[in-house]
Image: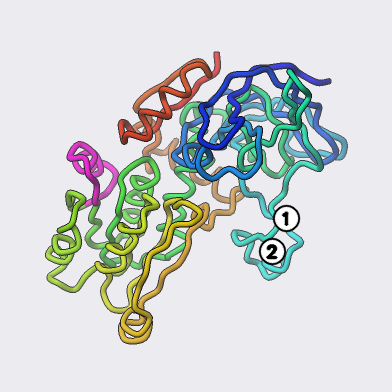
Amino acid sequence: MSRIVPAGLLNERGGQVTIEDVIVDAPGPGEVLVRIEATGLCHTDLTARRDALVFPVVLGHEGAGVVEEVGPGVLSPTVGTPVVLAWKTPCGRCPSCRRGRQPWCETPQATAGPRIHRKRDGADTAPFLRVGSFCRYVVVPADAAVPISPALPFSVAALLGCGVATGLGAALFEVHIEPGMDVAIFGLGGVGLNVAQGAAMARAGKIIGIDLLEEKLMLARQFGTTDGVRAGADAVERVRGLTGGRGVDVAFEVVGHPQIMAQGLDVLAPGGTLALVGAPARDAAFSFLPRHNMLSLQQVIRGCVYGACRPALHFPLFAQWALEGTLKLGELITVTISSLNEVNDALLDLQSGQGLRTVLVFQ
């Protein structure tokens, strides 16, 4: 049975989110319909206004809810199961998946065809990052709806779907921080603070947070940073000063700006790794000296998408850590909204650096 519900649509590059009715189809074979209870507003939703290639698109990709209908052949999850949505679900068939490298899946699962249509003209509407959680109902592959404990509130569970997974995974799975390694994190938003939590869990040595806002530097101490540095032209010098001039073993760039990427490379010790976590513009570029950085210092620059997480394995684990108090989730939420009509203002606040995470809890 199709459903007609409002959704937050982006109809053109650089445009505002418009609230329009969409038609959500019933799930097809191997798919499930999820009633979204809460969705986080992530910086990546902002980048869609700059980088999206297909329009119209339903924004939102950090969602949690309840399975309301299953398509033919679906045995799990069952109707009524609380789930977190994964925006990158391994296909299990591509060369990377067959080699056991599921986080690097080359053809992530998606629905077999368009499942959302703009009501006013019937136009097929893409779900952003295969989720589209700025809508009360979404259809996703069954494997993308990961069951979690019902004890975890949806408002915090939603954060597992992107910001938490990306940040924690970057520190725990992508880079494999060893005990005692010194770490620098450029950007202390929702993702950067989860990098800090992951680095602390990995028993890093110094965990140095770098941000423009003093309040974020102070708040980051609660999430595991040991030192704070105000972002600016002298950030490299100050980070190196905190490490006796040696530099850090791992630097995480969580902003997506080439100038900060270059600073991240400049703070590395010999043999250090720069992990690019933030989402730059498609045409962004930064330069480095291969002879100096790669050959002489044997440094590494690596991309980091979704923290090399395996959602089916790691989402329930993260949820359990949150219930045990090992992982801070509720502390990441600074604003809660209850209507799609508030999304544009919330995205403006996000763009200006205000707060950490805004969560839309559907009423």
Quarter of image, res 290:
bottom left
Could you say where residue 307 lies in the image, as x and y percent from the top left? Answer: 49, 55
Q: What secondary structure do most residues of the magenta stretch adopt?
A: helix
Could you say where residue 83 lies in the image, as x and y percent from the top left? Answer: 62, 34
Locate the N terminus by quadrant.
top right
Q: Which of 323 and 153 is in front in this view?
A: 153
Q: Is mark 2 on a helix, strand or loop?
A: helix
Could you say where residue 37 lies in the image, as x and y percent from the top left? Answer: 57, 23
In the displayed structure, 175 sits above or below 350; it is below
Amino acid type for the residue under numbered disc 2: Cys
Q: Name the residue under label 1.
A: 91
Q: Dots 2 and 1: beta carbons under 8 Å?
A: yes
Q: Which of 108 and 9 is in front in this view?
A: 9
- In the picture, measured across the screen, residue 335 lies left or right of residue 307, that is left
Q: Mark 2 points at which residue?
A: 97
* Residue displayed at 54% across by 45% down: 51
Q: Residues within 10 Å of mark 2 (few under 14, many from 20)?
A: some
Locate the C terminus by quadrant.
top right
Which residues fall within the magenta stretch? 210-225
Q: Is mark 1 on a helix, strand or loop?
A: loop
Examine the rendering and report whether any part of residue 123 can be seen: yes
- In the picture, measured across the screen, residue 227 lies left or right of residue 83, that is left
Could you say where residue 230 lies in the image, as x and y percent from the top left? Answer: 17, 49
Q: Residues within 10 Å of mark 1 (few under 14, many from 20)?
A: some
